[in-house]
């Protein structure tokens, strides 16, 4: 019985990784158009994480992060979250806007707008890939940017979710440019549909 369960999990992980790579390719193309400098995306890993332990997935729960949140409707309703360390998010804003690294020091209106656009592109690309792969419809809401400790950002999504599945799709992504490589986390938390 354990072997069967392991095989089923391995099959799901393989499916998620295939869909994640397809999403990354789409996101890379869109970000190249948006970006003032060459940047591409890579999947470091893709898998399933226990939803109840998500605050541990993105690193230290007390680290300051920038989260881009989108609510998802459709055949597999849920919640999508792109999480970047605060300093990494600022560096990514600088890279995407062609400014010198270190120019961005706060997430103000302009930085928030860049992060919303980035989150929209990355999350929509992943969702389109998942949609194509599974033949399901997934429709994202407009993105919202939040800055807080990692645990607070993730926990606030879970509190707003209500009834969620035990497992979450977790994709670790690297934004690689000529000046710096930045790691981010994409989380998709499916809701339980009655």
Image (tube, helix red, strand yellow):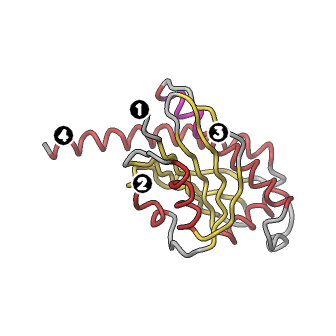
Determine whether the residue tagged by mark 1 lies in a helix, strand or loop: loop
Residue identified by numbered label 1: 194
Q: Nearer the viewer, mark 3 or mark 1?
A: 1
Magenta stretch, residue numbers? 126-133
The residue at 60%/71% (across/down) is 149
Q: Main secondary structure of the magenta part?
A: helix
Query: In the displayed structure, does residue 69 sit left or right of residue 53?
Result: right
Which image quadrant: the C terminus? top left
Q: Work out how far the residue at label 1 is from the one at label 2, CA to CA, in angstroms.
A: 19 Å
Q: Work out how far the residue at label 4 is from the one at label 2, CA to CA, in angstroms.
A: 22 Å
Residue 177 is drawn in which quadrant?
bottom right
The residue at 18%/40% (across/down) is 4
Query: In the displayed structure, does residue 184 sit left or right of residue 6?
Result: right
Sequence-first tag of 3 and 2 = 2
Sequence-first tag of 1 and 2 = 2
**Where is residue 53 drawn, in percent x and y?**
41, 61
Image position of 11 with respect to 41: above or below: above
Residue identified by numbered label 3: 124
Q: Work out how far the residue at label 3 is from the one at label 2, CA to CA, in angstroms.
A: 21 Å
Residue identified by numbered label 4: 4
Residue identified by numbered label 2: 51
> CB of mark 1 within 8 Å of CB of mark 2?
no
């Amino acid at each position: 019985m354990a072997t069967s369960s392991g095989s089923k999990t391995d099959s799901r992980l393989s499916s998620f990784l295939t869909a994640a790579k397809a999403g990354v390719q789409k996101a890379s193309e869109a970000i190249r158009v948006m970006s003032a400098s060459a940047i591409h995306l890579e999947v470091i890993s893709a898998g399933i994480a226990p939803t109840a332990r998500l605050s541990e997935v993105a690193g230290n729960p007390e680290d300051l992060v920038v989260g881009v949140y989108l609510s998802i409707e459709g055949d597999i309703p849920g919640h999508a979250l792109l999480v970047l360390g605060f300093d990494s998010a600022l560096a990514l804003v600088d890279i995407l806007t062609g400014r010198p690294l270190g120019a961005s020091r706060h997430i103000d209106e302009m930085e928030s707008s860049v992060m919303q656009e980035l989150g929209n592109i990355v999350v929509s690309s992943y969702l389109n890939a998942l949609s194509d792969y599974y033949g399901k419809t997934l429709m994202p809401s407009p993105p919202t940017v939040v800055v807080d400790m990692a645990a607070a950002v993730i926990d606030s999504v879970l509190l707003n979710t209500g009834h969620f599945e035990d497992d979450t799709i977790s994709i670790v992504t690297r934004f690689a440019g000529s000046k710096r490589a930045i790691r981010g986390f994409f989380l998709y938390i499916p809701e339980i549909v009655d």
